[in-house]
Image: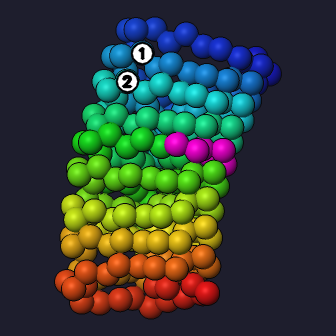
Amino acid sequence: ISSKINLQSIFISYNTVVIGTSTFQSCSRLQSVTIPFGVKTIGDHAFGSCSTLQSVTIPDSVTNIGDYVFQNSSTLQSVSIPGSITDIGIFTFSYCRNLQSATIGNGVRTIDRYSFRGCYALSSITFPSSVITIGSHAFDTCTSLQSVTIPDNITTLGSYAFDECTALTSVTIGTGLTTLSNNLFANCTALQSITIPDNITGIGSSTFSACS
């Protein structure tokens, strides 16, 4: 266990196809990771709680990224998710407290539940035309997020998706949605303007509660 904790750098062979579950979890001195082209799957918790990890490179050979993969990697500052990945798993980047930039590639279809929860430094996010689903709590407590545009291609937006985004001032909703989920923008205390299209036929309970 102690050798794993002291691991500062890794070389992943170009022959590697799968990085398994919890492979590098809690490698607290690991600062950067380059995943070589050829890797197709990154398992659950693979780099979770790598508390000094600042950068990671994910190639477009990766098609499957698991749940909790980078959770609590609290010094990770930026990530680019290639379009070869169709589903960003649950809690994948949750509580990456210093994550300032997340680029989502065109090809990603689902941003699953809690994916970016507690990314306190994330100030903006752009959704490509491939995204159709944002899960519940996906961006809740992203307390630096200032504006959100939900494009027309998104047809499902889960409850609490942007709950407690306390710096959020403006929201634009696209025409792909017909209802707004419960607590969707609850506790967004800085929210000043929201554009809701005519095709919205239902607004859930507490959708904008405590938007003071």
Residue 110 included in the magenta stretch of the image: no
Assign a secondary structure to mark 1.
Answer: loop
Residue 113: percent from left, percent from top: 45, 60
* Residue named by callout 2: 59
141 above or below 192? above
The C terminus - image quarter: bottom right
The N terminus - image quarter: top right
Residue at 64%, 30% (x, y): give it.
54
Q: Quadrant of residue 38?
A: top left
Magenta-colored span:
95-101
Left or right: 130 in relation to 41: left
Q: Quote the CA–CA distance across marks 2 and 1.
A: 7 Å
- For label 1, the crowd category at 10 Å Cα-Cα, with few meaning under 14, some 14 to 19 and many 20 or more, is many
Looking at the image, can residue 68 be seen? no
* Residue named by callout 1: 36
Residue at 26%, 70% (x, y): give it.
174
Q: Quadrant of residue 132?
A: bottom left
**Tag 2: amino acid:** Pro
